[in-house]
Amino acid sequence: MIEFRSVTKTYPDGTHAVADFDLVVPPHRTTVFVGSSGCGKTTLLRMINRMVEPTSGTIEIDGESILDRDAVRLRRSIGYVLQNGGLLPHHRVIDNVATVLRLDGVPKREARDRAMEVLDVVGLDRALAERYPSQLSGGQQQRVGVARALAADPNILLMDEPFGAVDPIVRAELQTETLRLQQELHKTVVFVTHDIDEAFLLGDQVVILEKCAQVAQVGSPSEIIENPASDFVASFIGTERGARALRTKQTDRGTVLVDTAGRTQGVLVEGAP
Amino acid sequence: MGLFGDAIAWIFSPDRQTGSLPLSEAIGTHLAFTVVSVLIAAAVAVPAGWLIGHTGRGREVAVALSGAARAVPSFGLVLLLVLVLGVTHKVGASTTAFVLLAIPPILAGAYSGVEAVDRRVVDGARSVGMTPAQVLGKVEVPLGLPLLIGGLRSATLQVVATVTLAGYVGSWGLGFYIVQGIQIRNFAQILGAALVIVVLAVVLDALFAILERLVVPAGVSARRAPEN
C-alpha cells in the first residue's frame, strides 16, 4: 500500500506542481493517474521512488515513510517503466533487463538467466536478447523496459506514460499484455497517462487530476462513468461525446446503442449477466 | 631542385643521424613533450570535465576559463613561464605552458561528452537505482567517450605544433632546427623540420581519428536491424 499524506511539491521558481495531495494506493491493484499535461501526475509518480522529493508531506509504503529510506535502495526495490524505455543504448537487451539484479550484486550468469525468464514473461523472443536497443522496434523497446522493471521482482511497478510513444496498434497490444501480466503477477501498479480510455482500460482505481494535482475524482472506471463528480470530470471523460455518449435505437431485431456520430456501437442485451 | 627538394634532401641526409642533435632524437623529444603534456593535462581536465558534466555545475566557469586560455599567446606564455620559473627550469616551464594549452580542449571534450548523453537515458539509469557514481561510470563516461577523444585529439594537435616553440628556450625538439635555421639562414633546414612536424601532426591526427571510431559504444553505432 502506498499512502500520500498532504504531499506538496513547489519548485524553487515558485511553480506549484502538487498542492496538498492525499491518496491511498491499494496493494496488488492498478491505480491510474490521468490528467492533461502539466497536471503534476508524473511528479506524483516520481515522488514514489524519490526521483522527485516532496517539499512537504509524507509518502509511506506499507506504513514506512520513504523519506527515511536510502533513495538508491528504494529505487532498486521499485520497478519503473519510462515513456521512452530509458534503456541504456550501449548495453544489450539482456544486460538492460539484468541491470537492477546486477546493481544488487547478483552474479552475472544468474542475473542473465533470470533476465531470460523475464523476457518470456513479457513476451519477447529470446533471440532478441543479444541485440542492442537501437536494433529493436518501439514496441519491443517498451517491452524491454517492462522486463527491466520486473526483473528484480518488485512489489511496486511505476509506469510513466509507457505507451505514449508507440503507434495505436502496438499500444493496444501492449495494453492487453499489461492486463495479462497484472492478472498473473498482482503487482501494485501506479500508471500515469493522459489517455482516459487507457486509464479506464487498465485501472482498478482511476484518479482524475486537475491543475496542481488536485483530485477531481477517485474511483473505479464504472463509478466515474456512472457518477462524474463534476462538469470537469464529465467533460474530461467525454460522457457527452464519442463512444461514451450512447442512446438507444429500436430496430427490427431489438435495441442497439448508437453514439453521437450516429454510428452503431453495440447491441443492448437485456437482463443482467 | 627547388626548396622543397632541398628540404626533403635535408630530412633524409645521413648528417641527420649524427651531429649535436640527431633528427630521431629531436622527434623523440618533440613527441615526449607532447605526450607528457597531454597526459598531465588529461589527468587534471578529464576528472574535472566529468564532474562538471555530471553535476551541471561550474560549466560557465569552465567555458570562461577555456575561452581565456585559448586567447593566451602560446609563445608569450612559454617565455613568461621561463622567466617566472627561472632559466634552470626550462623543461618544467615549457611543459607547464603546453599543459595549460592542452587543458581547455580536453576539459571541453570531457564535459560536453557527458552533457551530450541523452537526459532520458541518464534519468532511466537513476530511476532503476544507480548511484551517482554508477551513472557516471556506467553510462555517462562510456557514452561520452567519443567526444572526450575528440578533445584529446585537438589538444594533442595543438601541443604538437606548439612544442616547436620549445626550440626557442632550449635546444630540444624539432623547433630547434627551425630556430637555428633562421639564424644561419638555412631555409632547407627550416622547411625540412616544418615538414617533419606536419607529418607528425597528420599521423597523430589519423591515430586519434581511428581511436575516436573505436570508442563509439557498440549499441550506439549498431545499425537498426531489418524488421522481422
Image: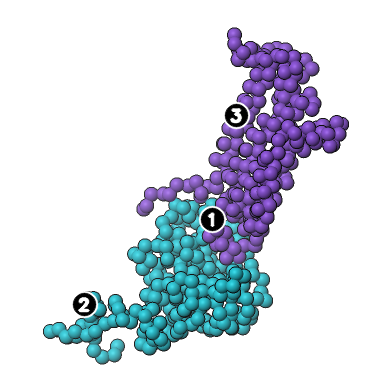
Chain colours: A cyan, B purple
Spot the residue most to the left. Answer: A252
Q: Which residue is mark 3?
A: B202
Q: Which residue is mark 2?
A: A262
Can I make out residue B36 in this image? Answer: no
Q: Where does residue A267 sit, x and y in percent of width and height?
A: 22, 82
**Can marks 3 and 1 be said to lie on one chain?**
yes
Which numbered dot is residue B97?
A: none
Q: Earlier in the sequence, mark 3 or mark 1?
A: 1
Q: Amino acid at mark 3?
A: Val
Subunit that carries the residue with mark 1: B
Q: Which residue is mark 1?
A: B118
Q: Is residue A181 above or below residue A229?
A: above
Q: Which residue lies at the image location 45% right of the left edge and 84% below the top edge?
A: A217
How far, Cα to Cα, is label 3 from label 1?
33 Å
Subunit that carries the residue with mark 3: B
Q: Is residue A36 above or below residue A221?
A: above
The answer to whether residue A154 is left or right of residue A243 is right
Circle 3 SS class:
helix
The answer to whether residue B121 is left or right of residue B75 is left
Q: Where does residue B46 sit, x and y in percent of width and height?
A: 68, 47
Q: Amino acid at mark 2?
A: Gly
Q: Which residue lies at the image location 46% right of the left edge and 68% below the top edge?
A: A161
How far, Cα to Cα, is label 3 from label 2?
74 Å
Q: Are marks 3 and 1 in contact (CB under 8 Å)?
A: no
Circle 1 SS class:
loop
Q: Is residue B226 above or below residue A140?
A: above
Q: Which image quarter is the N terminus of chain B in?
A: top right
Q: Where does residue B208 sit, x and y in percent of width and height?
A: 60, 36
Residue A125, picture quadrant: bottom left
